[in-house]
Amino acid sequence: MHAEKLAKHRDEAVDFAKGALIILMVAFHLPDFVAKLPSAANDIVYAFHMPGFLVLSGFFTTVAHTRERLTRLIRTIAIPYILLETLYLIGIGLAGELLRSNNSVELSFSNIVHHLCCAPVGTYWYLHTLLICSALYILFCSCRRLSQFHALILSSIACFLLSLIIGGLEWSNCMYFFIGAFFRLVTADIKQIIFPSLLSGVGFMIMCFATEEYSKYSLAGLFLTLSALSFFMAVQGVVHKGIYSSVSMIGRNSLCIVLFSPIFTIPSKFYLRFFDFDPSGWLFGLFSVALVIALCLLTAKLSDRAGISCYIFGRRLYI
């Protein structure tokens, strides 16, 4: 019942966009799949898929009721981040070679603290960035003498200065969060500022061929991000209803996929050899993405049933 109520109050077009972006995140964290793709594909996807998430995160960050928002931020983002990142670091440190992980970590208390604070490993950088940007924005908005616009400017400057000190905090990522927050100052309806249009897909393709500079810092990166969001929010009625509902469901549950996917992408190396018959790598990629997402959703459901989700994360994980 709780999950159904939450689902009813969500924008399915936005959930579909989040679902499409999270599927790309999982796919492009499979190194054996990415290795079979043209290098430009990797550059293009990395230019917009997580920036798109950060735009949406910034837009939907509410700043009213400061104490409640900070408490919720700690329970739903900070605690999951610290817990999962720590477990991930310990796992890699103890069995990195056995698991054939691309990351290596020297296990020590100081090193784990360093990674948690300054250099997150895996997809957990997103939670690290979201936590810092959201906390600063909420805190500046709590100052009654500041308008929300001035709070946005000051928190952006604070994040920029922190990015000069904290290596794992990239200003290019923070920038997209604050772009989303600025959009929220303009309108409460994201579709009024990122207008859903299938023509955005045409603009996206033209930009891909028109430039070789896909950096998140560039105007091309910003254009790719906004046009991808516009396109994904416009495909309802074009995509098969079953596929649309499935991707939207994945989007609703994007948090649990961010939390658990680093754990479930590692074993993909062990069954790669069973797909040697397909030199393109696409069957391996499709199977792995489906398996990782299914395992993430299953873990979320089991955590909810066991009561672990509400105890640790402050909410049910599966929506």
Image (tube, rainbow, N blue to C red):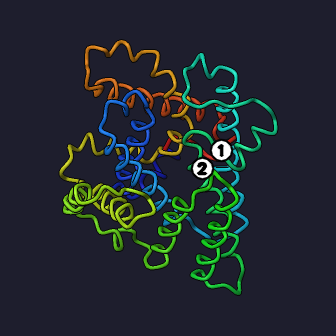
Residue 89 position in % (x across, y down): 67, 32
Q: CA distance from mark 2 to mark 1?
A: 6 Å
Asked if residue 224 lies left or right of residue 96, the reply is: left
Q: Which residue is mark 1?
A: 81
Residue 127 is labelled as 2
- Badge 2 local density, few (<14 within 10 Å), some, or many (20+)? many
Asked if residue 214 lies left or right of residue 94, the reply is: left
* 169 in relation to 309, above or below: below
Mark positioned earlier in the residue sequence (2 or 1): 1
Asked if residue 53 lies left or right of residue 244, the reply is: right
How many labels were placed on the picture?
Answer: 2
Residue 132 position in % (x across, y down): 65, 59
Q: Secondary structure at mark 1?
A: helix
Contact between labelled residues 1 and 2, with CB atoms less than 8 Å apart: yes
Residue 239 position in % (x across, y down): 21, 47
Q: Residue at x 63, y 39 (%)?
A: 309
Q: Type of residue at label 2?
A: Leu
Q: Residue at x 20, y 59 (%)?
A: 206
Which image quadrant is residue 313 in? top right
Q: Nearer the viewer, residue 284 or 166?
A: 166
Q: Secondary structure at mark 2?
A: helix
* 219 in relation to 243, above or below: below
Asked if residue 290 lies left or right of residue 71, the reply is: left
Identify the residue at the far bottom of this view.
145
* 56 in relation to 152, above or below: above
Q: Residue at x 69, y 21 (%)?
A: 94
- Badge 1 local density, few (<14 within 10 Å), some, or many (20+)? many
Q: Nearer the viewer, residue 146 or 305?
A: 146
Q: Type of residue at label 1?
A: Tyr
Residue 125 position in % (x across, y down): 59, 47
